[in-house]
Amino acid sequence: MSRHTPDKLKRPDDGKLWGYLAGLIDGEGTVSYTKSPTSVGNKDPFVSVANTDEALVLWLRETFGGAVYVIKDYHRKIASMSVVQPRPNGEPYKTLYSWRLKGRGTVIACLKEVLP
């Protein structure tokens, strides 16, 4: 099963869903950009929410569009940089899932929808 879909924004009619997305972005998400030589100003904006709950991230994709990425080795990679210490009980970290919307028009439309 491919988890990547086009980044076109879906627009649910329920305002409560947009409020829920605003809370997720505020608590678990980020609004940023990546450098891209083909984008206006060499910057490609994105909105993302990262979580260990796969069902939540897949729901975001189904409800709002975008793409889902699986980041299995995230904690191990940052632990090797001494940012996060290994778990004392030796248990592995949970898999991290990331939902992402990208593209200038898509990001602007999403941010306008989540404004209070």
Image: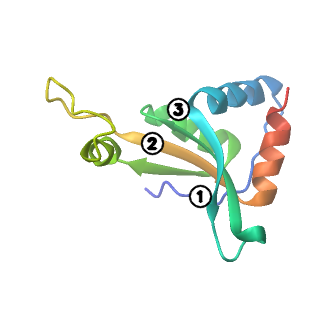
* In the image, farthest residue toward the front: 82
> Mark 3 = which residue?
56
Q: Label 3: few (<14), some or many (≥20) within 10 Å?
A: some
Pair 1/2: label in front: 2
Q: Is residue 7 above or below residue 63?
A: below
Could you tell me which residue is drawn at 27 percent across and 34 percent down? 93
Q: Earlier in the sequence, mark 1 or mark 2?
A: 1
- Callout 2 crowding tier (Cα within 10 Å): few <14, some 14–19, many ≥20: many
Q: Residue at x 83, y 37 (%)?
A: 113
Q: Earlier in the sequence, mark 1 or mark 3?
A: 1
The quadrant in which residue 82 appears is top left
Give me the C-alpha separation between circle 3 and circle 2. 9 Å
- Residue under pointer 2: 97
- The residue located at (44%, 31%) in the rendering is 53
Q: Which mark is residue 5?
A: 1
36 vs 107, left or right, is: left
* Left or right position of 41 against 93: right
